[in-house]
């Protein structure tokens, strides 16, 4: 007698891993790193890092913990530092949620989770306007100080007399994301990675108490375009490894270098992608589709939120954690607290990839993003876990 195959069980959103806010998340890095400088107004953190007079953070966009550990031949120097991660525990940090650049950079810069700083996804709804805002490009424009009102750690450090500097691509100097997430002290633009790390070391030595941040984005670009299983990505990781070694070897006395990332990444095959624009069930009752392929904010038409939640649970709930807005808030996905001004930016339904073989693309609305090979944003370990490697002098 033949028996029908059992339906795969639906996932419980309460079983999703929650970022380690307050103890080992990206938002804890800068408050812990400069805790010895007696800077007023720093956000509280339970992360304890040994003090140093001179602190440098080298953030590599897209260099997840799992990807780094899987490529020791391409990154021998960084691999040699794995045991130093997170104050010598040998463990990773978690990014916040969503595990995406705009969210993570703002968490690093402000020392706060996305539920507080408010950049809670790649694309989120602007309350009352019925449109999505791309928070990397800040389109459509929204008043920056109202959207993200908290001071950055760089601003607080600069006000307390710490020589503070960001060294990055000149392209980022005047972006709104830099303004709300990373401003404070001096911005110095340099085109090449070598110029950036050399200047970062120079600025680190320029005063008795310093805080320097530098950034490299080409690894993330290669992952999106070619995938983390590509020669292009591996070649970029080799470049990152050389840059990190170069910076470590140039550290002045009484300094610490932290090498970290904003998120990891995973390749999702074409057959594992669901096209929202071609799926009538997922589209039913949806006014706006925000977020990105591995972490979707779903905004329902008025009165349809419960039905949208039920349908998304039925269609993708065996491979994604599907939660209502309030369930996601209660689960702590966006941090221990979600500010009132942030609540309505979050989707009525939030769908987060739990497995490696799912992404919800939108080929009509998001044609460029839908062609990306490497993706991120979810609470899965491949995207959520990032290194916190350390070199001290």
Image (cartoon, rainbow, N blue to C red):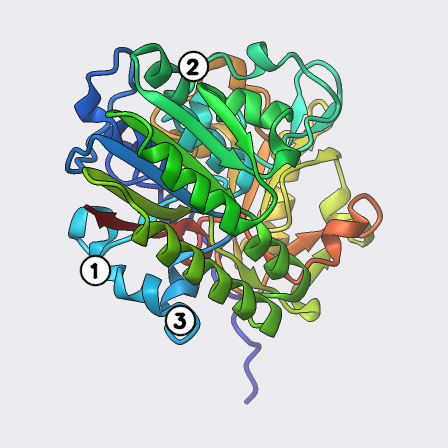
Query: Could you tell me which quadrant the N terminus lies in?
Result: bottom right
| Secondary-structure class at tag 1 | helix
Q: Is residue 89 left or right of residue 11?
A: left
| Residue 257, picture quadrant | top left
Q: Position of residue 201 (x, y in %)?
A: 37, 41
Residue with the mark numbered 1:
83
| Closer to viewer: mark 1 or mark 3 | 1
- Distance from Cα at disc 1 to Cα at disc 3: 15 Å
**Residue 269's disc number:** none
**Could you classify mark 1 by the number of other residues whose Cα lies within 10 Å: few (under 14), some (14-19), or many (20 or more)?**
some
Specify which label sits upstream in the sequence, 2 or 3: 3
Q: Is residue 262 visible?
A: no
Q: Front-most of 100 and 308?
A: 100
**Residue 70's disc number:** 3
Residue at point 66%, 63% (across, down): 373
Residue with the mark numbered 2:
151
Q: Front-most of 255 and 336?
A: 255
**Could you classify mark 3 by the number of other residues whose Cα lies within 10 Å: few (under 14), some (14-19), or many (20 or more)?**
few
């Amino acid at each position: 007698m033949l028996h029908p195959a059992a339906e795969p069980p639906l996932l419980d959103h309460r079983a999703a891993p929650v970022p380690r806010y307050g103890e080992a998340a990206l938002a804890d890095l800068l408050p812990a790193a400069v805790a010895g400088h007696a800077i007023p107004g720093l956000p509280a953190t339970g992360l304890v890092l040994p003090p140093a007079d001179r602190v440098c953070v080298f953030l590599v966009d897209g260099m997840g913990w799992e990807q780094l550990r899987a490529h020791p031949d391409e990154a021998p120097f960084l691999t040699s530092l794995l045991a130093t991660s997170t104050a010598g525990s040998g463990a990773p940090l978690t990014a916040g949620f969503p595990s995406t650049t705009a969210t993570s950079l703002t968490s690093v810069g402000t020392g706060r989770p996305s539920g507080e700083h408010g950049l809670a996804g790649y694309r989120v709804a602007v309350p009352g306007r019925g449109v999505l805002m791309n928070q990397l490009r800040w389109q459509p424009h929204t008043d920056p100080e109202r959207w993200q009102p908290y001071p950055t750690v760089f601003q607080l450090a600069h006000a307390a007399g710490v020589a503070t500097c960001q060294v990055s691509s000149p392209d980022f100097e005047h972006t709104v994301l830099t303004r709300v997430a990373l401003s404070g002290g001096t911005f110095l633009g340099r085109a090449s990675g070598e110029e950036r790390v050399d200047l970062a070391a120079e600025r680190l030595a320029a005063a008795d108490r310093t805080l320097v941040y530098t950034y490299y984005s080409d690894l993330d670009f290669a992952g999106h375009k070619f995938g983390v299983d590509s020669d292009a990505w591996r070649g970029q990781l080799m470049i990152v490894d050389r840059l990190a070694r170069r910076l470590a070897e140039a550290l002045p006395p009484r300094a610490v270098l932290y090498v970290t990332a904003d998120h990891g990444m995973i390749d999702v095959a074409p057959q594992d992608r669901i096209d929202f624009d071609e799926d009538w069930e997922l589209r039913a009752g949806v006014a706006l589709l925000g977020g990105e392929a591995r972490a979707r904010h779903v905004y329902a038409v008025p009165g349809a939120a419960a039905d949208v939640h039920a349908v998304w649970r039925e269609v993708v709930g065996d491979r994604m954690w599907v939660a209502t807005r309030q369930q996601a808030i209660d689960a702590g996905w966006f941090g221990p607290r979600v500010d009132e001004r942030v609540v309505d930016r979050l989707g009525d339904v939030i769908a987060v990839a739990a497995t490696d073989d799912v992404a919800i693309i939108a080929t009509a609305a998001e044609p460029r993003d839908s062609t990306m090979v490497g993706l991120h944003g979810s609470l899965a370990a491949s995207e959520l876990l990032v290194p916190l490697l350390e070199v001290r002098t």
